[in-house]
Amino acid sequence: MKVKKLLLATLSVFGIVGLLHLLNINELIYLNPFVLISLRWLSLAVAIWFAIEKRNLTAWILVAMFIGVALGHDFPEIGKPLKVFSDIFLRLIKTIIAPLLFATLVVGIAGHSNIKQVGRMGIKALVYFEIVTTVALVIGLFAINISQAGVGSELKVESSQIEKGNKILEQKQSHDVILDIFPENIAKAVFENQILQVVIFSILFGIALALVKNEEKKASMLLFAEGLSETMFKFTNIVMLFAPLAVGGAMAYSVASLGLGVLGNLIKLVLTLYVALFAFVALVLFPIGLMVKLPFKRFLNAISEPVSIAFATASSEAALPKALEKLIEMGIPRKVVAFVLPTGYSFNLDGTTLYLSLASVFIAQACGIDLSIGQQIQMCFILMLTSKGVAGVRGASFLILVSTVSSLGLDPQKAFAILAVDALMDMGRTTINVIGNCLATYVVAKWEGEV
């Protein structure tokens, strides 16, 4: 009861402080800047009190997010260096992913020796991924054509954006969608954090172990994999204790670096993207959940931590270990979660594909080019191919955007201007990527009769 009263008090304080800020911005009242800062931090103090009483990681992550925003806005010089917490957290997360995926997949495949099921799950997952990402592309097109956010926009490219864009383009490498799925060196795949390559190696290893006739040798390897899996989940729980610091640091850095004046002509693009992402959840993911009889309350409880981490850090990888753990706790078999979830990280990027179609047309509108329906459909076909299997590439969405804009005959440097708000948009699209992949895992499990 005390926690519920504290939650109500926290929401009330946030509401009152937010209303005062809104009135002050619209010059309906005048409040001294020092008073506004004091009110902000008073509301945060109440939120911290709530998190202490709640004793819940999700609550601490959400509170840390607000603290990070306040620090970045009120004390940018303090906020910028805090990115180191986010970087440390992401490094630790990357050490978890490969051994965790390897152990869970090997146990899931060799422990049950149902090799045919792996093939079935692969086909079903890919069919589902292709359908849903195609719908995401179409929703992105509808959204930007309705909002016309790019019409009349002046895409001013700052020198900092040109420098950032060129750095991303410099590390562009030739990408073969099929070839890059398979690892040439497992150590290299782990080092470069190529999730899909680690998955392929782990599947083949699990199948090979299932085929081993000597039961003693097979049992010892399975015992090792089970022990490794359990240890890595405990490792994840330890690392997740640092999540609030990482989330706060990431938000403080983002707000301190971006500021509020950076939006300018791009405010309509950002708003269009978030409305389109919300529409995708409401019109696509929610009906899919109804069709497979998803237990929404349990599902939301399971994904709350991974989603909040993904939003704050703008990194799907940061959310992967916790998403694996929570979906298994929810009752989805380990073998399904370990196969479908990481595979979706390469082939089921719902938020990213929606963003790419939307941003491409936005740039065309800003350049005064009216793309025909045929040209937009052609662009969708290009994006359906180029957006697959590049999750492990740094700045992948920007690289795809530049190549798509170029294929439409537009100046690729116009895409550089979007980098000004890319971090803000990345938070939204990464969140939808994680939600979409968690739902896809349940769908395939349901399809397989495992839940």
Image: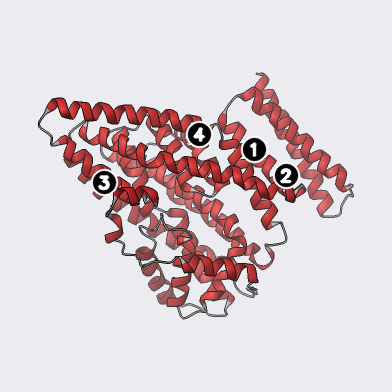
Q: How far apart, in angstroms, are the residues tagged by discs 2 and 1?
A: 10 Å
Which one is earlier in the sequence, the residue at label 2 or at label 1?
1
Q: How far apart, in angstroms, are the residues tagged by discs 3 and 4?
A: 25 Å
Which one is earlier in the sequence, the residue at label 2 or at label 3?
2
The residue most toward the top is: 1
Q: Decide: marks 1, 3 in contact (CB < 8 A)?
A: no
Task: For marks 4 and 1, give the one nearer the viewer.
Answer: 4
Circle 1 residue: 64
Image position, residue 439 (x, y; %): 40, 42
- Res. 201 mark: 3
Q: Amino acid at mark 1?
A: Ala
- State left or right for residue 321 relative to residue 40: left
Q: Amino acid at mark 2?
A: Ala
Question: Considering depth in this image, is 13 or 343 the residue closer to the camera?
Answer: 343
- Res. 70 mark: 2
Image position, residue 412 (x, y; %): 51, 75
Question: Considering depth in this image, is 15 or 102 the residue closer to the camera?
Answer: 102
Task: For marks 2 and 3, give the one nearer the viewer.
Answer: 3
